[in-house]
Amino acid sequence: MGEKTWDRTLGRHLARRLLEIGACDVFGVPGDFNLVLLDQLIAEPGLRFVGCCNELNAGYAADGYARAKGVGACVVTFTVGGLSVLNAIAGAYSESLPVICIVGGPNSNDYGTNRILHHTIGLPDFSQEFRCFQTVTAAQAVVNNTDDAQELIDHAISTALKESKPVYISISCNLPAIPHPTFSFEPVKYSIARKLSNQQSLCAAVEAAANFLNAAVKPVLVGGPKLRVAKAGAAFIQVAEASGFPVAVMPSAKGQVPETLPRFIGTYWGAISTPYCCEIVESADAYLFAGPIFNDYSSVGYSLLVKKEKAIIVQPERVTIGNGPAFGCVLMKDFLEALAKKLRKNSAAYENFLRMYLPIGSCLAMADSEEPLQVKVLFQHIQKMLTSSTAVLAETGDSWFNCQKLKLPEGCGYEFQMQYGSIGWSVGALLGYAQAAPQKRVIACIGDGSFQVTAQDVSTMIRNGQKSIIFLINNGGYTIEVQIHDGPYNVIKNWNYTGVVDAFHNGEGKCWTIKVKTEKELVHAIKTSQDEQKDSLCFIECILHKDDTSSELLEWGSRVSAANSRPPNPQ
């Protein structure tokens, strides 16, 4: 009877599981339904609670953390917190990120009663939040008794790891501090069963794909965003090195394939691709797409000239060759590793690329220029900042297109949210990514409109001693929306952005802000951020003309606008 039970509680079990999978920082907002749970979480050595300004940013932070460490977690309160974080969890689902969303739920005695609780919509039905999360999570666990709590929690977390998707765990507010025999001080480690390929299907797929590619005159490889969820990045590199094919990436896969590969030709994004990349891909007589997502944004308004009969489409568990056949139960990693051993070297397409390639001339690099700062000059200087110890986060907007043109050194991280495209994502994601990867100096490019959505958690970055560099692109509105469909609603109220961040700083922690209007001022700001302010959060507000946008955004916007404005089909 003398055995300690205070550290064998439900809350401590959850904390140990989070630490075991690598979620050492949990982002959230306290609320009365989760306070006892938070007590239990922060009592576990090694687990840190990072308090955020709102639940949406806590979810975005867990998203950014998962991108850097492989898994993230957030804790919010019942319904008002849960429905607030829901948008961020939906984004994590679309990007296939394992985020553990934990909610402090109602007292276990209130389930099955006719009671009406606060933080609800005023009905004696506690399932509204649960139903909302069903469509954006891979598993849902409602823990309202201790007998099956361990099983429910472990099943949810293991599902997140297996499926690489968010999960939802609701824990009654009166349970976290209660001990139970199943909550061991040293729980049995997770042992996630590895998915296996069907060997017959794998062999047949590899044979058919090898014959298809070896018969081609000028084949190419294109990496897609699902390389991450398939954990097939290294296998893709093996194919690239063995085949001699030129290698491109889809825009949402930037950063997942080393741009230092010998035959890397850039981003394939239809009409706005890296120069000459589109011509090489679309003129190929065979192309292998590994983990692609063809949506209206990545296809530039459905305008890609990729023919199905020429394509091998490799998804995480399925391979389709041309118009058929298709092979199921084939893991992308296994397929690519086996395919690399069957391909003959063929560099014909890359030789074509070299014949047409002309190096892009440098533009306007005059460090003493007093001319108004231009977007292309700004990103030319950001390019010079990149090293293996940096990472780039690009917010939805023109930063998508400008950051795509950055040449990433080996080891330089890169993240953006293309599938979901939620403006404001980057502020919370920057908080989470920088917390997960303190060894990197993270550079975030954020538009003024997006920043206004989620700005508050810059204060959380300062509070946690982060040293990221934020380039605030101040051009007076929602530039990406202007290029799709303009109107007075795309103009926003201008803020004193450096003043806002100075107010967040309030003399506590390390933070440095500056406004720049010319290239000379920009060069000085960057130098300062890398020298005397290298240990501070640096906020550089760049004043730019409202019409100064990338040519790629202009082209992309017109094509997406055309796709959006297609008339209804005749009935």
Image (cartoon, rainbow, N blue to C red):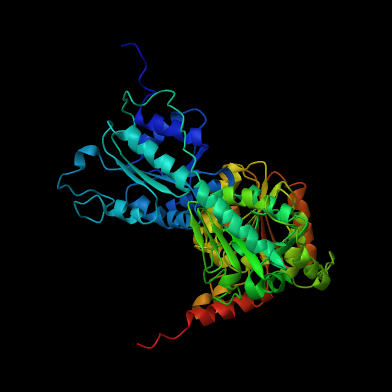
Does residue 245 appear left or right of residue 182 in this picture? right
Q: How many discs mark residues in the rendered view? A: 0
Q: In the image, residue 365 lies at what x, y percent?
A: 83, 67
Does residue 301 appear left or right of residue 78 in this picture? right
Q: In the image, residue 428 lies at what x, y percent?
A: 53, 53
Question: Residue placed farthest to the left in the image?
Answer: 114
Please give the name of the residue rendered at 80% of the width and 67% of the height, measured from the top-left corner: 351
Q: In the image, residue 208 lies at what x, y percent?
A: 59, 59
Image position of 482 with respect to 27: above or below: below
Q: In the image, residue 485 lies at what x, y percent?
A: 52, 80
- Foreground of the two, 561 or 298: 298
| Quadrant housing residue 269 | bottom right
Please give the name of the residue rendered at 64% of the width and 41% of the height, measured from the top-left corner: 438
Quadrant where the image shows the N terminus: top left
| Quadrant housing residue 87 | bottom left
Q: Is residue 240 visible?
A: yes
Question: Residue placed farthest to the top in the image?
Answer: 2
Quadrant where the image shows the C terminus: bottom left
| Quadrant housing residue 446 | bottom right
- Foreground of the two, 335 or 163: 335
Image position of 390 with respect to 44: above or below: below
- Foreground of the two, 179 or 290: 290
